[in-house]
Image: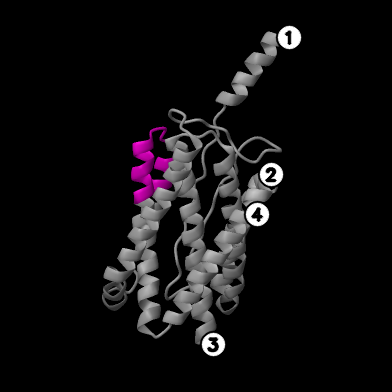
Amino acid sequence: MEEFRNNNQNNQNNEEYEPYDSWGTIETAVNVGSAAKPAFGTAGRGYTEVFYGEGVEDRQYLLTIIGCLFWGFLVNLLMCVTLGKSLAQSSDGSFLALVVPLQIVSCFMNAFSKKAITKFIAYNMLVVPMGLEIAFVVGVMTAVGLMDAVLMALIGTLIIGAVMFAMAYFKPEVFLSLGRTLLVVTIAAIPAALLIAIFAPAAYITMDIVFTLIFALWLGFDISRAMAQPKSVANAITSAFDVYYDLAYIFLRLLLLMAKNSSKR
């Protein structure tokens, strides 16, 4: 009996679930865009304890996550400063059609790779296209005098991030139990968003709010999972990948909300 229990425990520890696969795009002239994440882990836990790479100390694990996030948002900031204006002036946004495939490829690379270097390459393959989206939207909004809306979206993202971090820190079990629920809600929201975009575009602001709330919950889930999973460099990069995408997507959605709200005045 003891041997059976040990074997069963080993099988559970070795069982791998696909890390999340998510992608999204920002709406420009038309209301299009979607994002999806599959659920994680076994029933009742909502996350997976897949261990990639050698274990590291908690401090190194945390610094790796923070370093990756800092790098990603620094690249995005530089892209906004150097490319935002030119993208807004010289492009109609058609380049965004190439952004989504790059995001999908980066998500698959991150999901199926077990090496930290490959995951970091995948992370940068996500950061660059997301940066192009952000730079384009920020450039357009700045050109039409909506810089205040950009700042408000940034402040809103920081507030959401801080609140979700605090909630995930004190109540991680709440978020870790939401993985499959969030999956179902996100999948259901995608066709709803497409239908509203086609038949009732004026009401699409509701979907912006819905997706913002959904990804705020995903952010809490990903932060909780980052704290709960085994500590390794590869897992740290995956955690940074998750959290970065959540924050970037929330920022883009808030930008849309601010832009639409300003246009109604």
**Which residue: 69% across, 15% down?**
5
**Which residue: 38% across, 36% down?**
116
Q: Is residue 217 above or below residue 263?
A: above
Q: Amino acid at mark 4?
A: Met
- Read off the residue under disc 1: 1
- Read off the residue under disc 2: 173
Kind of element beneath mark 3: loop
In this view of the protein, which residue sits in the foreground, 58 or 74?
58
- Give percent across and percent down for residue 162: 57, 60
Camera-side mark, 3 or 4? 4
Q: Amino acid at mark 3?
A: Lys
CB-based contact (under 8 Å), mark 2 and mark 3: no
Does residue 134 appear anywhere in the picture? Answer: yes
- Left or right, 252 with respect to 118, comes to right
Camera-side mark, 2 or 3? 2
Q: Amino acid at mark 2?
A: Glu
- Give percent across and percent down for residue 1: 73, 9
Q: Is residue 133 magenta?
A: no
Name the quarter where the C terminus is drawn. Answer: bottom right
C-alpha gap between disc 4 and disc 1: 41 Å
C-alpha gap between disc 4 and disc 2: 10 Å
Q: Earlier in the sequence, mark 4 or mark 1?
A: 1
Q: Is residue 236 above or below residue 207?
A: above
- Read off the residue under disc 4: 167
**Which residue: 54% across, 43% down?**
226
Q: Earlier in the sequence, mark 2 or mark 1?
A: 1
In this view of the protein, which residue sits in the foreground, 218 or 228?
228
